[in-house]
Image: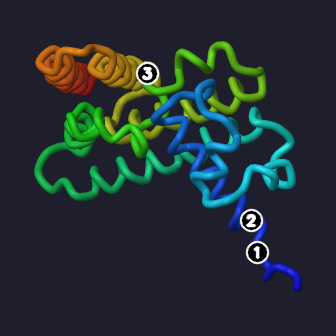
Amino acid sequence: MPYPKGHKIKVRGKIVESAARAFRTNGIQDVSVPFIMKGAGLTHGGFYSHFDNKEQLVAEACEYAISDTIALLQKVADQEEQNPQIITVIDYYLSPYHRDKTEMSCIFPALSGEISRSSEEVRQVFTHELERMIAFISNLADMDVSKGRALFSTMVGSLVLARSVSDPELSDSFLASGRLQAKEMVRSMQG
């Protein structure tokens, strides 16, 4: 009996979603295809009927993860009624919750170090998605892209450092300092 129409697309989506979750938490190199397939509720034998190789999956998972993050940050921004939306996004992005929920958080702090050693195809997708994220942040902050790059770099760097230390107080201080600096950047760049 044949699969219903759209089955293959749905299964592929489950694989990409599982990969994005796994890469956000564990990076690329430490995640195997069988692990990704298990996370999607599938056996690893069917992987190659959906993807040519792991690099293709990494590229698609990056696209998926950034779309997911932008949608989440837009939802956070839309809930704000008093402060500028970018301030609310900064508070969320540099929160202990976002730091600790790696499986659903922004992929840039998790993968930036590894991407530099990835294939040209993956690096091109990552670059395009980074530009898309910076455009989103820049639009939300009502600033030009150059300033948006600086703002997002501060946000990502603060999150990377907060995740990398073993001292919880130091980690929280990186988040707090990052929030303060990012908000100051917004105020000075808009003025």
Horizontal arrangement in the rendering, residue 166 relative to residue 160 (left or right): left
- Asked whether residue 180 appears in the rendered view, the answer is no
Residue identified by numbered label 2: 9
Looking at the image, residue 100 sits to the left or right of residue 110; the answer is left
Question: Marks 1/3: CA distance?
Answer: 39 Å
Q: Which residue is at 57% across, 50% downward? A: 18
Amino acid type at mark 2: Ile
Residue name at image x 44 percent, y 46 percent:
70
- Residue located 61% across and 60% down the image: 41
Residue carrying label 3: 149
Against 115, is 137 above or below?
Answer: below
User: Residue 116 at x, y = what percent?
Assistant: 63, 14
Q: Which residue is mark 1?
A: 6
Does 164 sit left or right of 1 as displayed? left
The scheme the figure's colours follow is rainbow
Image quarter hosting the N terminus? bottom right
Residue drawn at x 82%, y 37% is 53
Foreground of the two, 91 or 80: 91
Q: Earlier in the sequence, mark 1 or mark 3?
A: 1
SS at badge 3: helix
